[in-house]
Amino acid sequence: MSLIVHHLNNSRSQRILWLLEEIGAPYDIKFYDRDPVTNLAPPELLAVHPLGKSPVLEDAGRIIIESAAIAEYICDYHGGEKLVPPRGTDDHVRHLQWMHFAEGSAMTPILLRIYTARLGEAAAPLEARITQQLDSHFAYMENAVSEDGHFVGDNLTAADIMLSFPAEIAIMQGLAQRFPKLANFVNACHDRPAWRRAREKGGAYYGY
């Protein structure tokens, strides 16, 4: 039985499709569309995940949530070992840190910016702090990505796939000139045939 990705449009679940394309694992997609007014997930997704969030991975009745956990699960159980540095190495520790940075530290100011954008002038007291946090997190990523476009080691890893989303957000916010290595990283991600296949199957998201 193929894996099932419960995929919400304009969401971080695009990375899971890309990961599965990179390793050639068979999967099916169940599509969900955001409400055009509220931008929230549809109630149908609540039947899969009580929080109504995506991605959700279904594997023979087993439900896995949280993007980093899903990525680790796929790498451990569905042939993605090549995208993880060998356990016991310094690279593996760095890889683990970056996997969780992508959905932890990096996403906090990004989500704050998204939510407060709906508040207009009411968000003014928070704007300076949010901007400072976005700048510091993007600068941290800029300084960490190597000249050949990877966050860990010399080849693509699951951490690169996870970090593609916050890097894309930086570029969408018009910060390519300030963070040129992140811009090159995003371009390299988008040039990968597996990313293009995932984009074709999953649909456009956030302008990409």
Image (cartoon, rainbow, N blue to C red):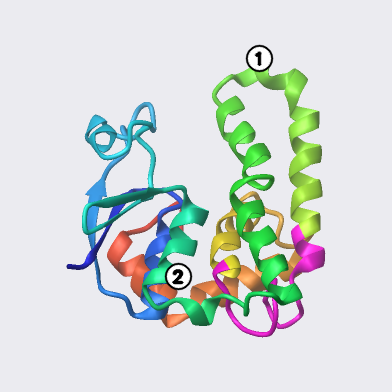
Q: Amino acid at mark 2?
A: Asp
Bin the neighbour count of mark 1 within 10 Å (Cα to Cα): few under 14, some 14-19, many 20 and up. few
Task: Tell me where residue 177 sits by quadrant.
Answer: bottom right
The residue located at (67%, 48%) in the rendering is 106
Callout 2 touching callout 1 (CB < 8 Å)? no
**Relative to 116, does residue 132 appear above or below in the rendering?**
below
Secondary structure under tag 2 reads: helix
Residue stretch rendered in magenta on the structure: 141-158
Can you say whether 203 is above or below 77 in the image? Answer: above
> In this orientation, which residue lies closer to the viewer: 28 or 33?
28
Q: Residue at x 37, y 65 (%)?
A: 17
Is residue 45 left or right of 157 when viewed as pictured?
left
Front residue (pair 183, 144): 144
Q: Nearer the viewer, residue 202 or 4?
A: 4
Q: Residue at x 64, y 49 (%)?
A: 173
Who is closer to the viewer here, 72 or 15?
A: 72
Pointer 1: what residue? Answer: 122
Residue at 63% from the left image edge and 45% from the top image edge: 104
Residue 180 x, y percent position in the rendering: 75, 68
Vertical position of residue 192 compared to residue 169: above or below:
below
Q: Is residue 60 left or right of residue 198?
A: left
Residue 193 position within the rendered picture, expressed as x and y whole percent measured from the top left: 42, 81
Mark 2–mark 1 Cα distance, whole angstroms, equals: 45 Å
* Image x and y of residue 203, in percent: 32, 59
* Residue 41, placed above or below residue 86: above
Residue type for callout 1: Ala
Q: Which mark is residue 76?
A: 2
Residue 134: horizontal and vertical position, in percent? 74, 44
Badge 1 element: helix
Label the magenta part by its dominant secondary structure. Answer: loop
